[in-house]
Image (cartoon, rainbow, N blue to C red):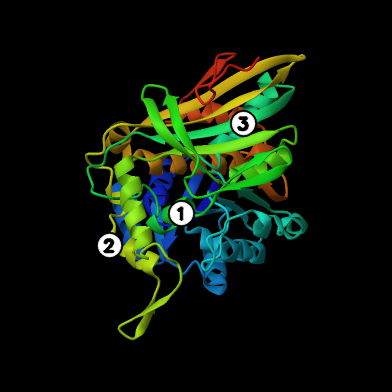
Amino acid sequence: MGKILIIGAGGVGAVTTFKCAGLPEVFTEIMLASRTKSKCDAIANFIGGNRIQTAQVDADNVSELTELIKKFNPDMVLNLALPYQDLSIMDACLATGTNYLDTANYEPKDVAKFEYSWQWAYQQRFKDAGILAVLGCGFDPGVTGVFTSYAQKHYFDEIHYLDIVDCNAGDHGKAFATNFNPEINIREITQKGKYWENGQWKETEPLEIHKPIHYPNIGERESYLLYHEELESLTKNFPSIKRARFWMTFGQKYINVLEVLQQTGMTSIKPILYEGREIVPLQFLKSVLPEPASLGKGYKGQTSIGCQLRGIKNGKPQTCYIWNNCDHEVVYKECGAQAVSYTTGVPAMIGAMMVLTNQWTGAGVMNVEEFNPDPFMEKLNLYGLPWHEEINKKLPVETEPYV
């Protein structure tokens, strides 16, 4: 039904390309591009079957991106590169009149700050061009927004409280590693926390607020309050929400190592002089940590990500918990990846499918929760991320039931 250009050959790019390649009736032609073409070639060879074309492109360079898009002429660009590159890829899509999708919102390289304002500012330009930009179509953000939209559509008149809970209970056997790009991951969790309450943002110190939360098939895990970008779009698009929080699990060993790295300056994003040249400590640290795409072999355990919601239906209190559990070993057997890459890469494929099959339509810049959630939810069950729900039961994040 359409041609897609995938930019980014990390763990997520590999999963999305693999899943798209298995659906030739939807994705008629696929090109995978990256700064390092050899990574694209390795993914294409792993998939086999001559389904994947590859190319080299600098995703920071708008003219290079524009030239490649014009040459391949895709119906949609899937941005699975770094969040720093969102705007340059969006600019190239505007220049060529091409639909756009990403999995994480923009953040500048020199400031550990991520928000949608930069991308939402493209709304009128995309609308005038008659093309669509789908923002945040991974798992969180992404599926968590679809879960929230689905719950609002089917179970609530008003959502009042939202807690997004993200647990990785897997063991990769490494001394220290991050499950997605180390630079982005560490920037995210070392900045101050933030949550929405009663019409305003409340800020916390990094990892200051934490508590044990029970996760299905996993058990209790210590969970830390972080800021995550979908809180910004969900509180905007569902204004009845009184409080929205995001929780993520970390093991004590991970926290201890991270504290040492912070204290020694290795997580800093400020350039320093080393042997006569400037380097960024966090970028150097990234270069010596394991590649997230390499963690799949031997990775055991599950992830569990979901939305716990409270609100009212027909004037009565209502609760809803929607979640997915994903098994690292099962994912590795299917496509050689680990579950964190899989839970981001599969939704990116499904989001592209929604656009190419005209189930998600429009022009402008839109977050995933602004579309009809039902066809997306159906495809999650079909393509490897089955979901579960509980209605009107005590929510694991709460210490007391909602009455």
Residue at horizontal 51 percent and vertical 69 percent from the top: 60
Badge 2 element: helix
Label 2 crowd bin: few (<14), some (14–19), many (20+), radius 10 Å: few
Q: Nearer the viewer, residue 345 or 75?
A: 345
Mark found first going from the N terminus, 1 or 3 = 3
Label 1 to label 2, Cα distance in Å?
19 Å
Badge 1 element: helix
Q: Closer to the observer: label 1 or label 3? A: 1
Label 1 to label 3, Cα distance in Å?
23 Å
Label 3 to label 2, Cα distance in Å?
37 Å
Name the quadrant containing residue 291.
bottom left
Name the quadrant containing residue 94.
bottom right
Which amino acid type is shown beneath numbered disc 3?
A: Leu
Label 3 crowd bin: few (<14), some (14–19), many (20+), radius 10 Å: many
Which amino acid type is shown beneath numbered disc 1?
A: Thr
Residue highlighted by disc 3: 162
Q: Nearer the viewer, residue 305 or 8?
A: 305
Q: The N terminus is located in which quarter?
A: top right
Residue at horizontal 35 percent and vertical 64 percent from the top: 266
Label annotation for residue 288: 2
Residue highlighted by disc 1: 190
